[in-house]
Every structure is written in structure tokens, then in C-alpha cells.
Image (cartoon, helix red, strand yellow):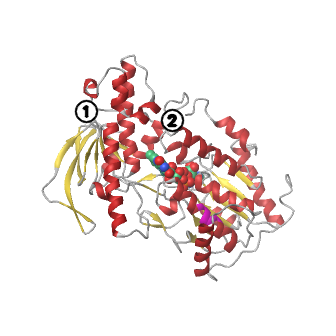
Amino acid sequence: MNIDGKETSPRHVVAVIGAAVAGSEVARILAERGALVVVFEQNARPYGKIEDGLPRWHVDQRREEYAKIDERLSHPNIYYVPLTRLGRDVAFDELAEAWGLSGVVLANGAWRDRPFPVDGADQWVGRGLVYQNPFIYWFNHYPEKTYSGPRYEIRPGTIVVGGGLASIDVVKVLQLEAVLKALKRLGKEADLVRLEREGIEPVLKSHGLTWQSLDFKPCKLYYRRTVLDMPLADVPPNADAKKIEAIRRAKTKILDKAQRKYLFEFQELSVPTGLIIEGERMAGIKLSRTQVEQGRVRVVAGSETEHRADLTISSIGSIPEPIPGLAQNGEVYQYVDQKLGLLRDGKTAVFATGNVLTGKGNIKDSLESAVETGTFVAERYLGLEPGGFDASKGERQAVQEVAQAQAGALAVRPPVSAAHVAEILARVRNRQSAVGYSGEYRAWIAKVTPPDLQ
Ligand SMILES: Cc1cc2nc3c(=O)[nH]c(=O)nc-3n(C[C@H](O)[C@H](O)[C@H](O)COP(=O)(O)OP(=O)(O)OC[C@H]3O[C@@H](n4cnc5c(N)ncnc54)[C@H](O)[C@@H]3O)c2cc1C
């Protein structure tokens, strides 16, 4: 079958896993240079952490990022395959070997919460302990009529263990939700976006209320290092001592400002060392004091104290989910060459890109990583000429430098024969039709977008 004429000549065919910021950008780069790109996405919608991570008060930013992803995935050389999870609906070994693809790029992000660092904690998930990823997913989606996932009750005095930007969002969600609920109870107008923008006290004041009048115990964020160590701002690789000090001071200001606006409590130099269990629930945690010596965190012996709370949220970082068949090295995948994101060489090389490779949870880093990987795979691995996409000069230069260092390490691959392209596309169309996807990207998005999605 030759539905769109793509099977009549040899082509490179690449599978990309994950359709969000990084996956859609890699797919665009390769598609614009003539490769056929099959993008597998576990969800119906492709937006990843833009939809399920970035909190929903970022109304405009989320819409802009959705539009960019839609634009990239609309390229005629891209085959979107929704509702298809690598490791469940398609086996990794099958894709990386039996499909006979030119390459595979994993852009599947970091969706596994790093385990709470006390033995046995996971048995209390849903019974006093909650992880950040499902909590933020709930926050972003629960207003939808069709939401059917777990629901979380905001409790006074919730404990949050964390320290990065995402943990600040977690404490914001807790505080903002508590105020919105209180306002609703009092019959007052409650607007999340306004509350986030203006801060809790000015909004309460406009209703003739004070924070004290709500009589709600704020949540408290615990961090194992000092505020100056918090990963709230990036230190550029070439920063001198003065610049590093300025960035460290800026972090204190970021935290102070967040505390003033959202009224949460903060305790540095504290690490969980035990659990408080009562009956069938986790009723809090035990925390010990720490000292930071030459960058290392040391627990102070005998300093453990009990901290009771109905709810503890663990927000200590997200790591890639294990994929059956793909080797792990501790928390991350095992790389042949981590700088290149090369996971496996051979007939079908496998690369990683975006959050899964950088370990950094931000849009800019995922996008830059995707430009590097996409350009490298296109130019050095598939031998595809630049086709008018707009990688900036700096990024192109960085790619060329890496490529130079790797010259000869990866041979340029021959394209897939026309007959085999047809076989691959037949598999793709089978899967698309099994999940009810007609091949019309925009029509699909319209169909699977809840009318009340925020
Ligand atoms: C609470 C929170 C706040 C944030 N705030 C900001 C912010 O203010 N600014 C900022 O720049 N960044 C922020 N981020 C981070 C940012 O949203 C992400 O780092 C970025 O969007 C990641 O893009 P990505 O494409 O690398 O990964 P993801 O968006 O995670 O995309 C991975 C995709 O792969 C899919 N997938 C995963 N596994 C499989 C599989 N096995 N098979 C098929 N598909 C799979 C996923 O469904 C997803 O669509 C925040 C994140 C969180 C959690």
C-alpha cells in the first residue's frame, strides 16, 4: 500500500519516543531534512510536562508551548502515534531491532519521582505520603469533568520535602488551594491566576480578610542543604567567584519573595530519617539536622525529631522511568557516550534527548538538547543536509565540535529501502488505527482535548 507516496524511494526512518518539547523538536529537525519520523506518545495529547507539570496558572505560557508543539508535529513527514507506550505497547528491543529503523531517539522525560529516602516509605503512598508528579498532575487536571485520577485533600501543616523549583510550586499549590477553598466557603470570588500573581495577603485584604483570620496552619518546606545551595538559579559554567556569590544571594531573594507572597514556612539543613506510623497511616516523618561540609551533606547524629502531618509530599526530583530491555546505571540509563546522548550503537542507534538526558527540568534546556541531538543525528548519523531549520549559530557550532571529537565513531547509515519503508509505515498505520487515530493530527487534538482543559 502506498497511501502518501512516501514508500517509493529509500528514506531514513527514525522513531522518537515522547512527543513533548524535546520529542517534537527532534522530530521537526529530522522531518524537515527529509527523514520520516514516527513519534510514539503514551498519552492522547503530546504536551508532556507542559500540560502535566508546569502548573496551570501559567496560562499563556502553556498555550504558547502547546501551539509550538502542534506546529512541529504537523509536518507531513511526521507520523504521530498516540496512546502508545514504549515498554508496554511496543517493546524496546522490538523497536530497536526488529523494526529495522534508521535510529531511535528517546525523548520520554523524567516521570519517576526519586524514591523518598527512608526505607519502607513507599508502602505509605496514598496513606499519608504523596509524590510530586501525581500531585501536580492532579492539580493541573482535577477541574476537568472527565478527570478520574486520584484526588488529594489539602491538609493544614502539610510537610514538603524538596528544594528545587518544582518543590516551590508544590508549596504554592498547597497554599493557594487552601486560600481558594477558604474563600469559596465564605462565598467570595476565588481566582487562582490572580491569587498566584498578586500573592495571598493582597487578595485576602481586598476581601476584608487576613491570613490569620483563616486559621490555617501553613505548609512547611524542608531542604537538606542551605538556602544558598538550592537549585533555584543556574550557575553558568564560566562563572567567576563574584558571579557565583551573586547567584547564591539571588537564590535567597527568590525564596524570600516566594515566602512573602505565599506564606509557607521553610527549614533548611533538615533531612528525613524516619517515619511516624499510626495504625494504617503515615502520620508524619522524623527529620534530622544536617551539616554541609565541602559540599557533602552529613547527618548530625542524635538530632532526630518528630514532625507530625496528615500529608507529606516528596518533591526531591524526577528521574527517567526504567524501560524493560534498556540498561540502567543507577538512576539514569546507561550511555555509550553521555555527551552525545548515545545509548546504543549498532544497526539502529539509540539516542536520548531532552529532560531524560539533561536531568534538568526546564523547557529551555530540553529544547536546546533536542536541537543538539536532532542536528547531530541528522548531519552526522544520517548524513542529511541542513534543510532550512533555524538552529542558532552557537548550537550548530557546539554540535560540530562534538561531532568533530566523535569523527569516525559513528558511521553514516544508509537509508532504509523503499520496500522496508513501506513495511514500517504499515506497522505504524496498524497501530494508529488500533488506537483510533485517523492520521489527521489537528483533528485528533480537537477530539481528545477536554472542553474544560485549563
Ligand atoms: C511542577 C513543575 C514546574 C515546572 N515549571 C517550569 C517552569 O516554570 N519553566 C520551565 O522552563 N520548566 C518548568 N518545568 C519543567 C518543564 O516543564 C520540563 O522540564 C519540560 O517541559 C520537559 O520537556 P521534555 O520534552 O524533555 O520532557 P516531557 O515534557 O516530560 O516529555 C516526555 C514525553 O514522553 C512521554 N513518554 C514518557 N514515557 C513514555 C513511554 N515509555 N512511551 C511513550 N511516551 C512516553 C510523556 O508522556 C511526555 O509526553 C516544570 C516542571 C514541573 C514538574
Q: Position of residue 233 (x, y in %)?
A: 40, 56
Q: Residues within 10 Å of mark 1 (few under 14, many from 20)?
A: some
Question: Which residue is painted at 55% across and 43% down in the image?
Answer: 61
Question: Which residue is painted at 30% across and 55% down in the image?
Answer: 117
* Residue kind at label 2, given as amino acid type: His
* Residue kind at label 1, given as amino acid type: Lys
Residue behind mark 2: 141
Above/below status of 450 relative to 166: above
Question: Which residue is painted at 61% across and 44% down in the image?
Answer: 66
Q: Position of residue 64 (x, y in %)?
A: 60, 43
Above/below status of 384 relative to 64: below
In the rendered image, which quarter contains the C terminus?
top right
Q: Residues within 10 Å of mark 2 (few under 14, many from 20)?
A: many
Q: Is residue 97 left or right of residue 280?
A: right
Above/below status of 200 relative to 245: above
Q: Nearer the viewer, residue 32 or 37?
A: 32
Residue 126's disc is none
Cα distance, mark 2 to mark 1?
Answer: 25 Å
Q: Nearer the viewer, residue 434 or 359?
A: 359
Outermost residue toward the top in this view: 187
Question: Which residue is painted at 82% across and 67% down in the image?
Answer: 10
Q: Is residue 196 left or right of residue 423?
A: left
Q: Position of residue 384 (x, y in %)?
A: 74, 70
Q: Magenta stretch?
A: 370-374
Residue behind mark 1: 217
Give the overall secondary structure of the magenta segment.
helix
Outermost residue toward the front in this view: 242
Residue 268 in sight in this render: yes
